Image: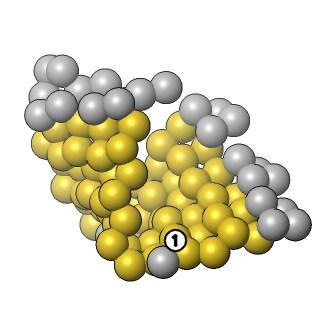
Amino acid sequence: QGSIDTKENDIHLFDTIFVRYGDTIIRTDQLHYNKKSHIIYSNVHVTINSNDSILESDSLKIDLNKNTLLLKGHFLGILSDSFDFPQ
């Protein structure tokens, strides 16, 4: 489920969400995109799988302008030698 604010072009997705970008998959129950700030975020549990790596956190913030990923809250990470978050 989701909604798009056609005036601001913001996107809000709910329920079970899978986002695939290359070999990376983001799973969460809520995902939001703020067009003005160019930020993707989730304030609920997030799992990121990339190659043989797994990252889990209570929240996610991807700043597409700064090319940064911020994970907050309880965090679990298993990084492989082949971990590479797509740019």
Q: Looking at the image, can residue 52 be seen?
A: yes
Image: 81 above or below 18: above
Counting from the top left corner in percent of width and height, residue 57 is at: 31, 61
Tell me if 9 is positioned left or right of 78 in this view: right
- Residue at 14% of width from left, 42% of height from top? 78
Tell me if 77 is positioned left or right of 7 in this view: left
Q: Nearer the viewer, residue 49 or 80?
A: 49
Counting from the top left corner in percent of width and height, residue 38 is at: 71, 47
Q: Nearer the viewer, residue 15 or 65?
A: 15
- Residue at 58% of width from left, 54% of height from top? 40
Image: 27 above or below 25: below
Tell me if 38 is positioned left or right of 67 in this view: right
- Residue at 45% of width from left, 58% of height from top? 60
Task: Name the amino acid type tagged 1.
Answer: Leu
Q: Quadrant of residue 81?
A: top left
Counting from the top left corner in percent of width and height, residue 45 is at: 33, 70
Q: Which residue is mark 1?
A: 13
Q: Nearer the viewer, residue 48 or 16?
A: 16
List the single residue furthest toward the top.
81
- Residue at 58% of width from left, 65% of height from top? 32
Image: 85 above or below 5: above
Counting from the top left corner in percent of width and height, residue 4 is at: 69, 69
- Quick one: label 1, few (<14), some, or many (20+) residues within 10 Å? some
Q: Nearer the viewer, residue 71 or 19?
A: 19
